[in-house]
Amino acid sequence: MSAPLRIAIAGSSGRMGRMLIEAVEAADDCVLAGALDVAGSPALGTDATAWLGRESGVKVTADVRTALADAQVLIDFTRPEGTMAHLAVCRELGVRAVIGTTGFSDAQKAEIAEHGRHTGIVMAPNMSVGVNVVLKLLDMAARALNEGYDIEIIEAHHRHKIDAPSGTALKMGEVVAAALGRDLKECAVYGREGVTGERDPSTIGFATVRGGDIVGDHTVLFAGTGERIEITHKSSSRVTYAQGSLRAARFLADKPQGLFGMEDVLRLNA
């Protein structure tokens, strides 16, 4: 049996971080090798699994190099500025990275691609296996429904989410736009108010809902004359994101460099 994959978790005391730690602890082929959190976090210096009622021997730290010293892969669901700083150290140390952070600028995405020339990276706005299967279905649907259908993307998340539309909704829009031969930057409509006039059939609309503890709901609506097609994914738990992240980490085990997406991990392009 091969040695377990050594994984570090960024944002280790947050909701997603703890879900990732629990998934790593439950996996037979993975082991927690590092736990990273922001300076000032009350979790610093504590055992990363103390909240589970057991000791892992891994202390939560704000020092990136300390957290990555014994890791092969970092899983990062934090914020763009934090992720970018972590990636620079991953590149330096040869640590692979699974990035679930959203809200990157175009310049930051270009920098991530450059890091991918030096270490293996899987980046996806949503690590859920189901969501990535939906992205494949959306590509197929958009190609078939390329005339006579208006396209709207509706997403809902919890009240604490800081970016809108969600990275998943934007990815869905990018997939649909590409299938139609359009550029999402030119055809997206992010808000409607007042007298807007008739809908431009070449646009892709977005609607955002924030409230409560909604984990993540996404619907792409193809509205034609006489019929509507809705492709929907609803998350009831962050467990799906954690399990998808572990699949991505395993995928990177033999990838010393390269920038990949979940479509590569799941072989959806095969």
Image (tube, helix red, strand yellow):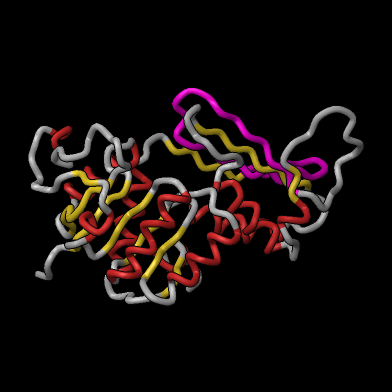
Report the residue at 38% width, 64% height from top: 88
Report the residue at 32% width, 68% height from top: 252
Q: Quadrant of residue 184?
A: bottom right
Percent from the top left, x then y, of residue 248?
A: 35, 61
Q: Quadrant of residue 119?
A: bottom left
Question: Measured along the vertical axis of the image, is residue 159 above or below residue 4?
Answer: above
Q: Is residue 3 left or right of residue 196?
A: left
Q: Quadrant where the N terminus lies? A: bottom left
Whether the magenta-drawn stretch holds residue 3 is answered as no
Question: Measured along the vertical axis of the image, is residue 26 above or below residue 155?
Answer: below
Task: Examine the rendering and report whether any part of residue 42 can be seen.
Answer: yes
Query: 253 or 221, which lies in front?
Result: 253
Query: 188 or 150, which lies in front?
Result: 188
Percent from the top left, x then y, of residue 199?
A: 86, 41
Give the residues in magenta. 204-230
Percent from the top left, x then y, of residue 155?
A: 59, 37
SS assignment for the magenta stretch, majority: strand
Question: Measured along the vertical axis of the image, is residue 51 above or below residue 245?
Answer: above
Report the residue at 17% width, 42% height from top: 48
Query: 43 or 199, which lies in front?
Result: 43
Percent from the top left, x then y, of residue 28?
A: 14, 56
Query: 158 or 83, which lies in front?
Result: 83
Report the residue at 75% width, 62% height from top: 182
Which residue is outermost to the top? 212
Q: Is residue 167 left or right of residue 202?
A: left
Whether the magenta-drawn stretch holds residue 217 is answered as yes
